[in-house]
Image (cartoon, rainbow, N blue to C red):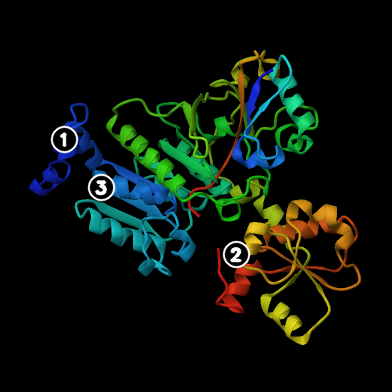
Amino acid sequence: MSDSISFSKAELERYSRHLIIPDFNIEGQRKLKAAKVLVVGTGGLGAPLLQYLTAAGVGTIGIVDFDIVDDSNLQRQVLFSIQDVGRPKVEAAKERLASLNPHINIVTYNTQLTSENALDIIKDFDVVADGTDNFPTRYLVNDACVILGKPNVYASIFRFEGQATVFNYQDGPNYRDLFPTPPPPGLVPSCAEGGVIGVLPGILGSLQANEVIKVITGIGETLSGRLFLYDALTFETRTLKVHKNPDTPTITQLIDYEQFCGIGLDKKSAFDGDEITVEELNQMMIRGDKFHLIDVREPYEYDISNLGGQLIPLAEIEEHVNQIESDQPVVIHCRSGKRSGDAIKKLEKYGFQNLRNLKGGILAWADKIDTEMAKY
Amino acid sequence: MATIIIPTPLRKFTENQSKVVTKGDTVQESIHSLTNVFPELKKHVLNDDGSIKQFVRIYLEDEDINVLDKEETKVESNSTISIIPAIAGGAI
């Protein structure tokens, strides 16, 4: 198929460093130009992935994301600049990538990948690169790729640690062979909660781009059947074997992945209790109401911004039960409202009836009450 | 006497240690030796019946213990056991 692909003088000059690699040459470049790659997630991993795939000359690149560019993205999402803050990520990404390489076609999907749209979006692409940030979407991307028979080039990161592999390639293992079930909600914090060193997605996303190029061109040996691990703190790397698991059920249809990952259940229980809005809390403070404000984040988060509440990190909340007032309203907050919901669940076991969760956490406070407050 | 490599998400339960030298002749004994020292780690790696949870993988060197002798896989004094958790970060 790629024999019919030709290049302009400008393209030949642009790709000349590829063309002179003996194992790659113009045939590899033709395969890249003929290829259609879908990048799911335009964040830390998506930034290097998209830039290298664009620069390398992948003919059609699809981008799926529903988010907008935020100040806190710029620490690692090197695709974006200050001027992009507030813009849809796919729009800003397309503009940047088009200026990097006008010879390719960029297709954007300003939407969340869901069980309803995933098969439709993925079906027209040859390879998927998963740069998402949560377990439900990881399983969704995997299952859709298995159903459609598409290779899924995978990387994920947490703090200083990264994982990369190629799933569902040439009858190799898929994500469910490695991790049949997701961890319970809250066990593994997201990067938004747990943090990530900004360079790490740059490293893992670049490795991912290289695997995509290998899958498309057929050169070298991909990471299919192998899991690459990188510890940026110790600079240790390991490559482990991944096998197909005979117990993995056959995937024939997409499911409710939030439910599969226990997210919906968790959300429901976290918000079963009384909530309080930042506006209501502000009024309580202005009126001088008597109440106990507890902040269940970590000390290093408290140092970035706080509301003056008593700091009791979520993991220590049960050790400090005796410090929590039972005869006045207790307002508990965290960054976004999730951990405070978990704290309330833990405390309710001790019989507290007076706990209220600050809806949207300190982020909502920074958005609506004190816009000078630093968000993170 | 294997060394167990602790992944980042679980280091908060091992006083931030990334490697722990354990006692025992099998993977199971090594992991129990680890969770005896750091009991908080137990519920994140083992089920109540002592089996390995499905959302973590245990490796001896570069091989999944599921294709060896599972928890009964023998270890040597210079063996390295890895606990591999699912992590999902990337976009945010």
Q: Give the residue type at disc 3.
A: Ala
Q: Is residue A326 above or below residue B90?
A: below
Q: Nearer the viewer, residue A90 or A308?
A: A308
Identify the element where label 3 is drawn. Answer: helix
Q: Are marks 1 and 2 on the same chain?
A: yes
Depth check, front residue: B38 or A246: B38
What is the chain letter for disc 2? A
In the rendered image, the quadrant that contains the C terminus of chain A is bottom right
Q: Residues within 10 Å of mark 3 (few under 14, many from 20)?
A: some
Q: Are marks 1 and 2 in contact (CB under 8 Å)?
A: no
Parent chain of label 1: A
Real-space CA distance between mark 1 and mark 2, rounded to the nearest whole angstrom: 50 Å
Q: Position of residue A202 (x, y in %)?
A: 41, 46
Q: Position of residue A348 (x, y in %)?
A: 85, 59
Residue A121 position within the rendered picture, expressed as x and y whole percent measured from the top left: 40, 50
Is the residue at mark 1 from the same chain as the one at mark 3? yes
Residue at horizontal 32 percent and vertical 32 percent from the top: A214
Mark count? 3
Residue A175 is labelled as none
What is the three-letter code of the residue carrying label 2? Ile
Residue A24 in the figure: left or right of residue A218 = left
Sequence-wise first label, 2 or 3 = 3
The residue pinned by badge 1 equals A19
For disc 3, the marked residue is A55
Measured in 3D between alpha carbons, the distance from the residue under mark 1 to the one under mark 3, in whole angstroms, is 14 Å
Q: Which residue is labeled 2 in the image?
A: A304
- Circle 2 packing at 10 Å, graded few (<14), some (14-19), many (20+), is few
| Amino acid bearing label 1 | Leu
Picture quadrant of residue A213: top left
Which image quadrant for residue A165?
top left
* Left or right relative to B4: residue A196: left
Q: Position of residue A250 (x, y in %)?
A: 55, 31
